[in-house]
Image (cartoon, rainbow, N blue to C red):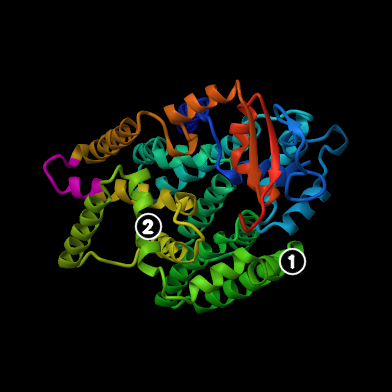
């Protein structure tokens, strides 16, 4: 990158960071798994909070021991490793969260988690710019892609969700960019080394990364077959197999998590069951439609089909990396829609960059066929930025993962003068009420019978 490109990209990154911080200040509640993020990263003695039933708590109460780093256990990665072994996720994201929290022991702030996401945001935007620059052949269009994607509700939501999906997004872009570079270039030692690093660390972020990697590598393998690059294909398969062995040596708990945990068995059962097929797939695409396209995704699907028909008629249709990347994202979304335990946007957060970039590329190319060819790229960027603005406006300039609602705010105010009792069956259920308990004057946790 030239100095001008670096400066422009830095300005865009700062702008996106400011937007994310703005919405971060409006985050008033958490998904239960966000609370669990801090507990898994910091709690000594298990993956659930230690609760003394019948005891009156106030403030952080038992959450303090669960979510904060104890001064005597700063940078305790052995404990973190064991917590993740007992959970159902790999450990890399929690290492970063624990590291930040260890810098501020005996305290809690949601910003400790959000800072990790903001750190990954910087690397995401750098790689996304390079990927867009490679695919568009234009620095201006690449900057436009960064601005468009970085200001979507989808990406801001990804940053505000204190889980590993921002980190997952980075590795999804990284593997995509690497394969884009080598699409028409001979695979060399540098490729295999970078491929191995991305695959191993990506898998240490989330098991679903394996699904995206499988599809993007499968579409890349098809290209190698079409180009008769069989030796490179053979070497890639060998390297991938070795990466799998290395990964299992680092993190052998994957086998237990996938084959023996409740979440893993649920995913396997869903994968081989017809039940819920249409509902799950339609559901996750609907989530993408809401968060990325403001309900206008059907329009972009039509535009993609129009462009495809146009290229077929003109004889310009070919199997390009752009097509392979879009196919990979679609297949990933379908697979996740089938096996994910819930129909939620978080599972497809890491591939929204593909759909955002595709929308820009398709819109630019179709507009380029009109009389406004010279300004097609700029007009496409403006259209998508306006769509982003409409999306934010339709949500009252709040985003789903800030969990804002006026009713919730009023409820928190009322709790300030109340002594409340929470009846639960299992300790982890208290995590789902973290903010309510935190705002209450005092609270008591009681044990419910499973028959109640």
**Disc number placed over residue 377 in the picture, else none:** none
Element marked by disc 2: helix
Residue 405 lies in quadrant: top left
Dot label at residue 252: 1
Asked whether residue 69 is in view, the answer is yes
* Residue 152 falls left or right of residue 301: right
> From which residue to which does the magenta span run?
363-373
Q: Residue at x 61, y 60 (%)?
A: 199
Give the total of numbered labels: 2
Relative image position of residue 73 (x, y in whole percent):
85, 39
Q: Nearer the viewer, residue 30 or 250?
A: 30
Q: Within the image, what quadrant is residue 331 found in?
A: bottom left
- Place of residue 381 in the rendered image (x, y in percent of width and height, measured from the top left): 29, 37
SS at circle 1: loop
Residue matched to label 2: 283
Q: Residue at x 67, y 65 (%)?
A: 257
Q: Is residue 95 visible?
A: no
Residue 285, compared with residue 390, is above or below; it is below
Where does the C terminus fall, quadrant-wise? bottom right
Tell me if residue 152 comes above or below residue 254 in the rendering.
above
Q: Residue furthest right?
A: 72
Question: Of the residues under marks 1 and 2, which one precedes in the sequence?
Answer: 1
Q: Count residues near mark 2 (Cα–Cα under 10 Å), then give few for <14, some for 14-19, many for 20+.
A: some
Indicate yes or no whether the magenta region holds residue 401.
Answer: no
């Amino acid at each position: 990158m030239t100095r001008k490109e670096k400066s422009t990209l830095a300005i865009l990154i700062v702008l996106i960071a400011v937007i994310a911080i703005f919405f971060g200040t409006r985050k008033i509640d958490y998904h239960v798994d966000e609370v669990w993020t801090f507990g898994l990263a910091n709690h000594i003695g298990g993956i659930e909070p230690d609760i003394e039933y019948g005891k009156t708590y106030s403030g952080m109460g038992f959450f303090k021991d669960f979510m904060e780093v104890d001064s005597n256990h700063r940078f305790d990665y052995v404990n973190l490793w064991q917590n993740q072994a007992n959970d159902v996720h790999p450990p890399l994201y929690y290492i970063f969260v624990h590291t930040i929290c260890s810098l501020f022991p005996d305290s809690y702030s949601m910003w400790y988690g959000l800072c990790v996401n903001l750190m990954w945001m910087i690397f995401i935007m750098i790689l996304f710019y390079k990927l867009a620059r490679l695919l568009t052949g234009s620095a201006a269009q690449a900057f436009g892609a960064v601005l468009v994607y970085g200001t979507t509700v989808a990406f801001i939501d990804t940053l505000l969700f204190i889980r590993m999906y921002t980190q997952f997004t980075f590795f999804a872009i990284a593997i995509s960019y690497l394969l884009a570079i080598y699409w028409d270039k001979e695979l060399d030692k540098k490729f295999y080394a970078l491929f191995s690093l991305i695959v191993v660390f990506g898998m240490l972020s989330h098991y679903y990364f394996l699904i995206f990697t499988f599809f993007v590598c499968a579409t890349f393998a098809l290209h190698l077959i079409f180009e008769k690059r069989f030796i490179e294909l053979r070497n890639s398969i060998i390297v991938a197999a070795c990466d799998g062995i290395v990964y299992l040596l680092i993190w052998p708990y994957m086998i237990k998590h996938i084959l023996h945990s409740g979440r893993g068995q649920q995913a396997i059962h869903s994968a081989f069951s017809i039940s819920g097929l249409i509902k799950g797939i339609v559901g996750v695409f609907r989530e993408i439609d809401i968060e990325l396209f403001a309900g206008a995704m059907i329009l972009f699907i039509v535009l993609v089909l129009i462009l495809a028909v146009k290229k077929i008629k003109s004889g310009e249709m070919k199997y390009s990396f752009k097509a392979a990347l879009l196919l990979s994202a679609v297949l990933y979304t379908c697979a996740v829609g089938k096996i994910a335990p819930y129909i939620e946007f978080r599972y497809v957060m890491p591939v929204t960059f593909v759909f955002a970039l595709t929308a820009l590329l398709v819109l630019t190319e179709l507009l380029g066929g009109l009389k406004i060819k010279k300004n097609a790229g700029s007009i496409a960027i403006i259209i998508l930025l306006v769509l982003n603005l409409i999306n934010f406006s339709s949500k009252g300039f709040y985003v789903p993962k800030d969990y804002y609602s006026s009713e919730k705010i009023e409820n928190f105010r009322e709790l300030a003068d109340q002594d409340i009792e929470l009846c639960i069956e299992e300790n982890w259920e208290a995590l789902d009420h973290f903010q309510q308990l935190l705002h209450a004057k005092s609270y008591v946790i009681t044990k419910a019978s499973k028959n109640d």
